[in-house]
Image (cartoon, rainbow, N blue to C red):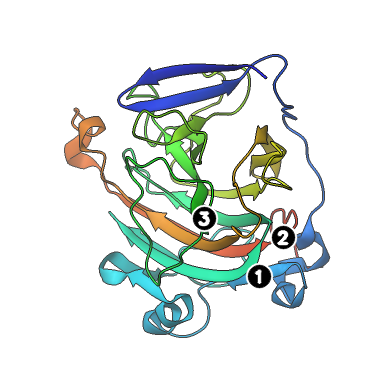
Amino acid sequence: MSRWWARGGGVTVAVLVAGWGTVLLGQEQPGLAAKYPGDVGIEKDPAVVFVENFEAGELKDIVARWGDARPDNLTLSDDVSPVSPGKRSLRVAHSGHLYTHHRPVDQLFARYYINFHEKCGYTHHLPFIIADGEPTPWPKGWAGKKPAGDNFFGTALDAWGEWGTVPPPGKWMLYTYWQEMKPYGRGDYWVNNFKVDDQQPIQRGRWICCEFMVKANSAPDKADGEQAFWIDGKLVGRFQGFRWRSTDALKLNSFWLEHDNDTHELNQDAEHPNRVYDVWFDDLVLATEYIGPVAAKQ
């Protein structure tokens, strides 16, 4: 195995190079959602572990379904994607989250739709798949900590500004905490393929279908874990060779729907006074197999 590492701004960037793993770029495949046009009935599929489309109840009811929230900046919105079967989404202004636990699994896919405000700046963190050996009702803070293999690992599908060189909100990457991460005090960054600079910046002001996956290693001594992400149904990055955990008892069991705008050092520029740090989420599905974009109703 070989990896190329670059450092900057207190973080680590990892990009696959020849001889390490496989990256299948632009691959399209049917997923679980194709069997449920408009996502109707998808919550009943045995592979599905959690669904949230923000259609049922008031905000307090949604928070109760999840279990934990930072609700001050959360509102329900009538801004939905063109393919959404519903009429509401969740608007997160500046920073906010919903957090839940689900049945423990060894592989988890998370699909959701996201829309960045046309004037949105850089973000700090976005949705996170988590394996927590000692789950609490609220998300833990792991910043600056290298986890042990028996208590925690996880990955977020984040927007990365490449230290301010990519227009906000940046480009897609996986932000990873695991037992073999480099000890630089922040997580490992995994971008799309062999080159750091060939992914287009994220488009603001439009709905984007995001999906990412984490697969745990099959045994404590096996480095056969994986992670991957898809944008609008196309596989952008797949990374293999992870020894996520040192015990089979540690499972993927938590999901953090998060938008955090704590990136002051990157947002102090000429555009800053006019930025609006709003992000919308909709049509979330968590499952043990690939989900894919919402299928059109017949």
Viewer-nearest residue: 79 or 107: 107
Residue 31 in the image: above or below residue 235: below
Image coordinates of residue 197 in percent, x first then y, are 52, 18
Amino acid at pointer 3: Ile
Residue at image x 57%, y 22%?
15
Residue behind mark 1: 49
Q: Is residue 95 left or right of residue 12?
A: left
The residues tagged by marks 1 and 3 sit, at their Cα atoms, a distance apart of 14 Å
Q: Is residue 83 left or right of residue 182?
A: right
Determine whether 180 is above or below 12 in the image: below
Distance between the alpha carbons at the discs numbered 1 and 2: 8 Å
The x, y position of residue 208, in whole percent, is 56, 48
- The answer to whether any part of residue 284 appears in the image is yes
The disc labelled 1 sits on which kind of residue? Val
Above or below residue 141? Residue 286 is: below
User: Where does the N terminus fall, quadrant-wise?
Assistant: top right
Q: Secondary structure at mark 3?
A: strand
Label 3 crowd (10 A; few <14 / some 14-19 / many >=20) = many
Q: Position of residue 53 (x, y in %)?
A: 56, 71
> Residue 86 appears at what percent x and percent y?
58, 72
Q: Earlier in the sequence, mark 1 or mark 2?
A: 1
Task: Tell whether 24 sits left or right of 129.
Answer: right
Q: The C terminus appears in which quarter of the rendering?
A: bottom right
**Precedes in sequence: disc 1 or disc 3:** 1
Residue at coordinates 41% horizontally, 69% vertically from top-left? 136
Circle 1 SS class:
strand
**Cβ–Cβ under 8 Å for marks 1 and 3:** no
Q: Amino acid at mark 2?
A: Thr
Q: Give the residue at mark 2.
A: 288
**Residues at discs 1 and 2 in contact (Cβ within 8 Å):** yes
Q: In the rendered image, which residue does mark 3 sit on?
A: 130
